[in-house]
Amino acid sequence: MYGEIKLFAGTASPVLAHSIADYLGLPLSGRDVFHFPNDNLMVKLHKSVRGQDVYVIQTTSAPVHRNLMELLIMLQTLRLDSAARITAVVPYLCYGRSDKKDQPRVPITARLVADMIEIAGADRYITLDLHAGQIQGFFSIPGDVLTAFHLLSEYVTERKAQMKDPVVVTVDLGFAKKGRNFAAEIDAPMAFIEKRRKGNDASAEALTLIGDVEGRDVILVDDEVDTAGSMSQAVSVLKAHGARDVYTVFVHPIFSGPAVDRLAQLPIKEIITTDSVPIPAEKRNRLGDKLTVLSVASLLGEVIRRVHEGRSVGEMFDE
């Protein structure tokens, strides 16, 4: 029904894109991305993709608008070159927190991003751990919303033998369901931190702990870490309640503003995350041996292969 797999990569996450290509045993297709003095972008393909099954790998972390526009322009370029099917592979989807009108006179920007990806030319999408599940409903095209928590839980299970009476804690109640699933995967009890957000900035206030962590190692889970404000408050609450070692586990290392400095100063045993968002070398060095980065390349690569072959993705997770 479709031609061969053609892999294209934006400029946002070249290392991850090459790792996906290596997993599939395929080269990344050639393209040029021009950045003009007026800040406009243009994409030019090296070869035609007419009739081919094309996958565009581009995360939309900072610089968000540059990376998003690059993705959209690349999708349209492929559509105009008559690709048979185009799949946007977006490890981290921007504007995930703008998923509803939670106050008067505000946009639902996640819906706008979904519309733009579709209008630009995508026939399908693949992404990881959306901030809110309802964002799937913003797309009218089919897609695969994957989770990297299988990779994270496997790693934590291997480390669990070194922990003392581990307990899984979620940074806030909104993440309770996913936290419960994670706790079930590693066979550990749960506790929760109650958090209330104030205003439209990135600040939030962690109020209290629900559950027992005294004398126990804590596995603190969340979907992403942006400025690390919530994470910092959570660790403070846990330590105040007698927690022993704290391990932080999250999928998307956004690491905006003061995040890395905050994490480096926290009494954290290990920071466990993925490469859905590239972490610059200076930030990696700042976190040192505390940082463990698991690659999502094999996960995304296997899904690309199964989509191309028309095979079940759910079988990967025994679903």
Image: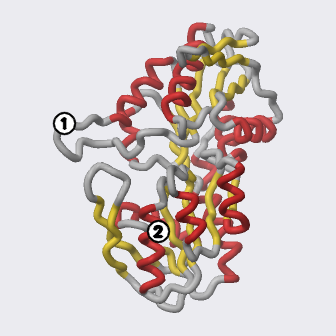
Q: Residue at x 63, y 63 (%)?
A: 272
Residue 70, located in which quarter of the rendered image?
Answer: top right
- State the quadrant of the N terminus: top right
Q: Is residue 294 above or below residue 44?
A: below
Q: Is residue 22 above or below residue 147?
A: above
Q: Which residue is mark 1?
A: 105
Q: Is residue 228 left or right of residue 78?
A: left
The alpha-carbon separation of the residues under discs 1 and 2 comes to: 31 Å
Q: Is residue 146 above or below residue 311?
A: below
Say what secondary structure mark 1 lies in.
loop
Q: Residue at x 39, y 41 (%)?
A: 135
Q: The disc labelled 2 sits on which kind of residue?
A: Ser
Residue 115, located in which quarter of the rendered image?
Answer: top left
Q: Residue at x 35, y 66 (%)?
A: 173
Percent position of residue 80, x then y:
57, 8
Q: Which residue is mark 2?
A: 232
- In primary-sequence order, the first of circles 1 and 2 is 1
Residue 249 appearing in the image: yes
Percent position of residue 283, x then y:
65, 54
Say what secondary structure mark 2 lies in.
helix
Name, please, the residue furthest toward the front. 37
Q: How is the image coloured?
A: secondary structure
Residue 180 appearing in the image: no
Percent position of residue 214, x then y:
47, 90
Q: Which of label 1 and label 2 is nearer to you?
A: 2
Q: The disc labelled 1 sits on which kind of residue?
A: Arg
